[in-house]
Image: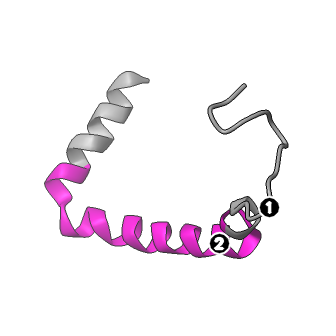
Amino acid sequence: MSPCGPPGLRHPGSTLDLLGGADVRARVGRAAREHLGTWPEEHPERAADIVGRIVKRR
């Protein structure tokens, strides 16, 4: 059992439908892509360090 109750349990006023809907997922995805698309250009040394760590683990 999760801290929020058993899986699938909904209560009146549950925000899961509001915050977990396709519209919200699309907006969050778009915002993440926009941020992640510009961050490496704005922080090239840090981005290279992160990519280097990822490649090193493989």
Q: Give the residue type at disc 2.
A: Val
Q: In the rendered structure, which segment of residues is drawn in magenta?
A: 19-47
Q: Main secondary structure of the magenta part?
A: helix
C-alpha gap between disc 2 and disc 1: 20 Å
Depicted 53 relative to depicted 43: above or below: above
Q: Which residue is mark 2?
A: 24
| 31 drawn magenta | yes
* Image coordinates for residue 31, horizontal then vertical, percent: 48, 73
Residue carrying label 1: 12
Label 2 vs 1, first from the N-terminus: 1
**Rendering colour mode:** one colour
Q: Is residue 19 above or below residue 23?
A: above
**Few, some or many residues within 10 Å of mark 1 (<14, 14–19, 20+):** few
Q: Residue at x 21, y 42 (%)?
A: 49
Q: Quadrant of the C terminus?
A: top left
* SS type, badge 2: helix
**Depth check: 11 or 47 in front?**
11
Quarter of the image for residue 15 reads bottom right
- Residue 30: x percent and y percent? 55, 74
User: Is 30 covered by the magenta stretch?
Assistant: yes
Q: Residue at x 65, y 72 (%)?
A: 24
Residue found at x 18% / y 62%: 43
Q: Who is closer to the viewer here, 17 or 4?
A: 4
Q: Depth-wise, is mark 2 or mark 1 nearer the camera?
A: 1
The single residue placed furthest to the front in the displayed view is 12
Type of the residue with mark 1: Pro
Looking at the picture, tell me which residue is in the foreground, 57 or 3: 3
- At 73% across and 35% down in the image, what residue appears? 5
Assign the N terminus to one quadrant of the image.
Answer: top right
Badge 2 density bin: few <14, some 14–19, many ≥20, Cα 10 Å: few
Return the x and y of residue 57 as percentages of the image width and height: 38, 23
Q: Where in the figure is residue 53, as x and y percent of width and height?
A: 29, 32
